[in-house]
Amino acid sequence: MNLVEAFRTDRRWMTAALLFAVAVIFLNLGSDGMYAAQEGRTAIITRNMLLSRNFLDMDAADGILYEKPIGHYWLCAPFAWIFRLDAPEPISVAAEWALRLPSALSALLAVALAAALAARIYGARAAAVTMIVLSSMPTFNNLARLAHIDMPLAAAHTAAMYFLYTGYFEELRCNRRIYGFYAALGWGMVLKGPLVVLLAGLTVLGMMLWSRRWKMVWELRPLSGGFLFLLIALPWYVVETLRTDGAFFDEFIVNQNLRRFTGIGSTYRDGERMPLWYYFPKLLAGALPWSFAAVAAAVLRFRALIRLKFRPATVFLLMWLLTGFLFFSLSALKRGDYLLPVYPALAILTARAVETGCRSLPRLDRRWIRGFAAFAALLVLGLVLVRCGVAARFGELIVEEKIRAISQADGRNIVIYSSYANRFFPAVLLAAALLSAAIFFGCRQAERGRYFTVLGSCSALIFAALLAYNCVLQPGTDGMKTVKPFVRQAQALIPPGGEVEYASGYNTELIFFLNRRYERNPKRPLRFVMASPKHAAKLRKKAPEAWRELFRTPEGHHYPIVMLERLPEDGGSRGR
């Protein structure tokens, strides 16, 4: 069954699921500010491409040269041109929409491809649930709404796996769709290098070992397919390596890939090797609340899972998930967003478990009331901790590095969100009451065996939560993350063509929106200096008569920055 047939078979669920995915990905996509570092870097490079009309250079002054291949910037360039990111004052244009649309469209493509694969393997209802599950997983939804390379890469990998299955594994016989597999790998190579090839290769290797079909290597048409792959990927790599005298190869292939994976010689995060179990909690949290269903299904089918006693199509999805998870877990350097390419496989398997459970689970026992009472008690406790300031203090301890198991960025988010919740505590209480009522209603429906009604109610609840976050909570807290208000103040003082020194930090959002010439280590003193609060305090303590603080970001800002003015040596005052 293909995707069109799935819509014809189960029109109501498929239409609702598609509208669900589109809404949670696109609504308020242009939320103010590009405070994620990679968003600012993408903006700088894309603007420089438009200004220079050179679409081979990834120019970001004082940034890491040759950090990534060029594919993502090519995707962003047309939207950047439409939204005029090369305007003299880019703070006045819809830069957020311009740079995030490629990720959002890639996410929608990944959702559609995952649903198409689910339809071919499990049917229309599983395809609809797949769209809901994948688009609402927090990690997937977050990266769908950011100008990062990860979502276009995940879409390319999902396309490769779709064509690998339909081009070979569906019937264990090659057809023309297999060339879609090699084409998707080629594009993935232009997006982020050899990662997509390694992940696909591990899936094929896993299937070969499971099936003991050793001739699979030649049945996949490696010669003609490999030629197509090289035709797409190789030209740019050759050109880039030659035009940079090998610097791109050394930085991207050796430093960004080999050293980060092995940890040998890597300076990223001081060469820190992260624990093998790092991705277990990351995946569970990144797939909430659907990870509860996935874990329950894994426990119920544990023996079959250990022995891989499933039909080949399910084993294919499991190989996609497990080999990718293992590969990333073995890497010395780990980040939660690296795991994104395995989320579509997890979503399909979870959707299948949910859909099967809705058809076969027995009615819920009346003892669910005890569980609901425990949930209500925990919810009340959480509200009390937020209201009393305990949650905010916990976040502050993380920021102060007194709790090192959690990143400082997460600590700042805890402080910001708990403070915001306290500002609007009556609305938070109302939301908690509605959540409790919805869960109570779902449990009553499960008691009557109406599990598809429960699924619909849960989906509506998740939909409401995502819309509340994307359209209310995120915009409400953006002021404590974005530096755009700071930029507006700075632009009033630094005329176009003026210069500024960055004495510490490298805030890409600030660099992009301010759009003034800048230097990190200028040979001559510059009048205006941007510095972190700690660095600014050191400068003023060392020579208090040499500096005047003009303004800074609000207290508790996620990315604190101070603007200093260097005073004349005679101690006189400059006009502003």
Image: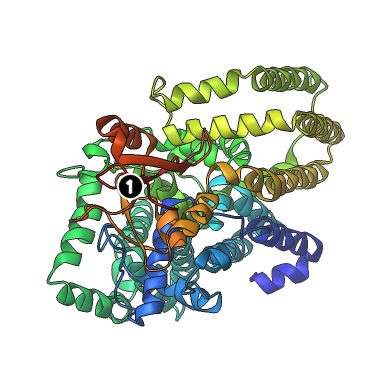
Observer able to see residue 15: yes
Task: Write the residue at 31% across / 69% down.
Answer: 58
> Where residue 166 sits in the image (x, y, percent)?
50, 70
Using the image, determine if residue 103 lies above or below residue 181: above
Q: Which residue is mark 1?
A: 327
> Where residue 436 sits in the image (x, y, percent)?
80, 29
Examine the image and state in which quarter residue 38 appears. bottom left
Task: Write the residue at 25% across / 35% down.
Answer: 272
- Residue lying farthest left? 245
Query: Number of labelled discs?
Result: 1
Using the image, determine if residue 549 lies above or below residue 222: above
> Where residue 128 sits in the image (x, y, percent)?
69, 58
* Quadrant where the N terminus is found in the figure: bottom right
Q: Judging from the image, what secondary structure is the residue with disc 1 in?
A: helix
Q: Foreground residue, 486 or 159?
A: 486
Q: Is residue 106 left or right of residue 330?
A: right
Task: Write the residue at 40% across / 55% down.
Answer: 508
Q: Is residue 429 left or right of residue 151?
A: right
Q: Foreground residue, 560 or 108?
A: 560
Observer able to see residue 153: no
Tell me the amino acid under the disc marked 1. Phe
Report the coloring of the rendering: rainbow
Q: Is residue 260 left or right of residue 311?
A: left
Q: Is residue 212 left or right of residue 246?
A: right
